[in-house]
Image: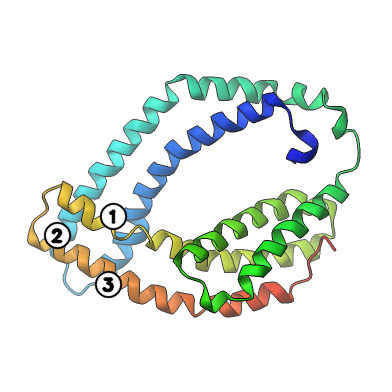
Amino acid sequence: MRPIADCSSLRTFERYARDLGRSVGTLRDADVLISGILAPAEAAASGKAGFDELREILARERQRRRDEVRLTLRGSVWTKLQLYLTLWPRTLDENPRLDRPVVGHGRKALRKTWKKAAKLGRRLEKLDAEERHEMRKVLKKLRYQAEFFAPLFARKESECFIERLKTLQDVFGYINDVRMAPKLAELCEQGGANTLAERATGYAEGYHEARTAHVWRDAGGAWRGLKRAKRFWD
């Protein structure tokens, strides 16, 4: 909405939101290391030696991140963000550029983001790690935009598109989370882990490396399914 809702107060609000988001994001990553990386690998392992110690190390890291987020929420950033949220309706009411239909802008925004996704999708099988990460970000943006503007368009078509988009996002979301797997070894080293914990770390990394190859095979079909879905904004 920036092209028609841009103003200095909203940019300040955006900056506060982004700073808070970064802090919370580190906690989310710590959660993923336990629930998304460690837990599935432990469940698949025939031997459980070393996993308890590894979980304790990750739990300490998560607690450290929680303390950081709590400190942030007690600081000025969260207070200022709440103030901007309180003033948000008045800020919008005072913007004359918002007194017009938004359908045309919605179409333009969705087309622009879809064009970026399609450009990467055309060479899906050849994307390297950084390009996959970029594709994930573009798909996330497209999802936000699609859900935001969907009420302006046909419900059945928008729901079909968004459901297929979610399927593709699941593939890229997992691949993005697995990029954090090497963090296990780093935290083990910092925590002075024993040999068994190091072996559990190696098993977890190997498990997700193999699973990534399997999950990635689903990306092509999910992308083709999304391409076949009617782009509801057109």
Tell me how far mark 3 sits from mark 2, CA to CA: 14 Å
> Which residue is label 1 attached to?
183
Quarter of the image where the C terminus is located: bottom right
Q: Position of residue 21 (x, y in %)?
A: 50, 38
Residue at x-position 18% and y-position 60%? 51
Q: Amino acid at mark 3?
A: Gly
Q: Position of residue 148 (x, y in %)?
A: 73, 48
Residue at x-position 40% and y-position 73%? 212
Q: Mark 1: which secondary structure?
A: helix
Q: Position of residue 171 (x, y in %)?
A: 51, 68
Q: Nearer the viewer, residue 157 or 90?
A: 90
Q: Mark 2: which secondary structure?
A: helix
Tell me how far mark 2 sits from mark 1, CA to CA: 14 Å
Q: Amino acid at mark 2?
A: Ala
> Which residue is label 2 attached to?
197
Q: Residues within 10 Å of mark 2 (few under 14, many from 20)?
A: many
Residue at x-position 45% and y-position 61%? 176
Does the rendering let one see residue 184?
yes
> Which residue is label 3 attached to?
206
Q: Is residue 193 left or right of residue 35?
A: left
Q: Residues within 10 Å of mark 3 (few under 14, many from 20)?
A: some
